Image: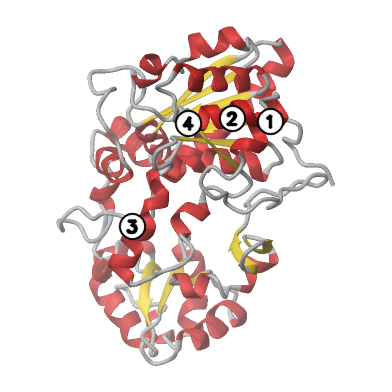
Amino acid sequence: MNQPLEGYRVLDNAPWAQALTGQILGDLGAEVIKVEDNIGGDPYRALAKLLEAQQGWVGRNPYYEHVNRNKKSITVNLKKDKGKEIIYKLVEKSDVYIQNFSVGVADKLGMDYATLSRYNPRLIYASSTGWGLKGPDSKNAAYDMMALARSGIMTIIGDPGTRPMNIDAVLADHIGATMSAFAVSIALLMRERTGKGRQVDTSLLGSMVHMLGNNVDFRLITGKEVQGSFRNRAANPLWNLYKCKDEKWIALGLLQADRYWPALCHAMGLEQYEKDPRFENIVVRAKNAAEMVSILDKTFATKTRAEWIDILRKGAGLILEPVNNFSDVIEDPQVWANDYIIEYEHPNYGKVPMVGFPMHFSDATSSVRLPPPEYGQHTEEVLQNLLGYDWEYMTKLKNEEVI
């Protein structure tokens, strides 16, 4: 089976979690050359020390590996003219250049779109920033937590009135990188139609505002902030979380509450409440939500989660799912059946599991062809095979700290 982006070459100059942009394109078949600084490289590599300090973990670096498979790594000093020359020559032979420098840095380095497009007018230049290219704060530094804070998402997590809560999931970085890969794919399609390259701009803030569009548009249209609800008095008790006998939680998802209310009452042995005037429809249940949640809490506590899933989903056809931790996720047969987690052959560790690719095509495929590269692993290979540099000149570049 062919791969959707097979035959395209990408220069990936985006460290940290934004390297996921290049990985997505690589999973889809593109040749991705990761450009790293010749002193230290991608800062994600150094997080292995943080893992050791926090969790006592010594070994593979999951943060780095997660966003850097299907890439070749070269080291280049972009502050030296001969380093810039390497990139300019590679740009001539590439389709896409990805960067996530702070606004203004690419211009100082001579890695801006205006410069690179002179070497390749068909180049797709993807700029991924924290806050967008315009505006008073465009040059501010940005990390994942900063974007989460500014997007508004921290205010809708947890019970109303509690402190803002962070999300330990690198969410803004990942959504931003996915949006960037989406933009690159659209730009490549546009190039097929017009023959012209172009710059595309995505940001962490823009990606998060788009993701939270339901909440943002609610505020724009109604003039009111989205209000969360306390679990113990949820406006719709049938759209809520409940703890079972084994301390495991269930997400009950009966959004069309009146439609499912009779079946829920019969399945849970609560027939006496089906016609109870306090609970017989969604309006009165909302007014008496605390009482209803209390009844459901006590009832769910009488059986294990697995038992309730059998009774409610398999037996009564109701909508609910387990509230999983990540140990549950990696054991979920649904995840494995759809290749959301895969196994691939790592040259050093043998067959290892890893997060797969979430898209499937009827006549094409994604794949893991290369493990995450060692620092500068492919410098000589790329310079020799693509640019025709000989060993004598590459040795000179090393001595001059260009590579």
Tell me which numbered mark, 3 or 2, is placed earlier along the sequence. Answer: 3
Q: Are marks 1 and 4 in contact (CB under 8 Å)?
A: no
Residue 219 point in image, percent of width and height: 28, 35
Q: Is residue 347 left or right of residue 399?
A: right
Answer whether residue 76 is visible to the viewer in this image: no
| Amino acid tagged 3 | Asp
Separation of disc 2 and disc 4 at Cα? 9 Å
Q: Residues within 10 Å of mark 4 (few under 14, many from 20)?
A: few
Q: Are marks 2 and 1 in contact (CB under 8 Å)?
A: yes
Residue 134 point in image, percent of width and height: 33, 17
The front one of 68 and 284 is 68
**Circle 2 SS class:** helix
Q: Which mark is residue 384?
A: 1
Q: Which mark is residue 33?
A: none
| Amino acid tagged 2 | Met
The front one of 132 and 383 is 383
Q: Residues within 10 Å of mark 2 (few under 14, many from 20)?
A: some
Q: Residues within 10 Å of mark 3 (few under 14, many from 20)?
A: few
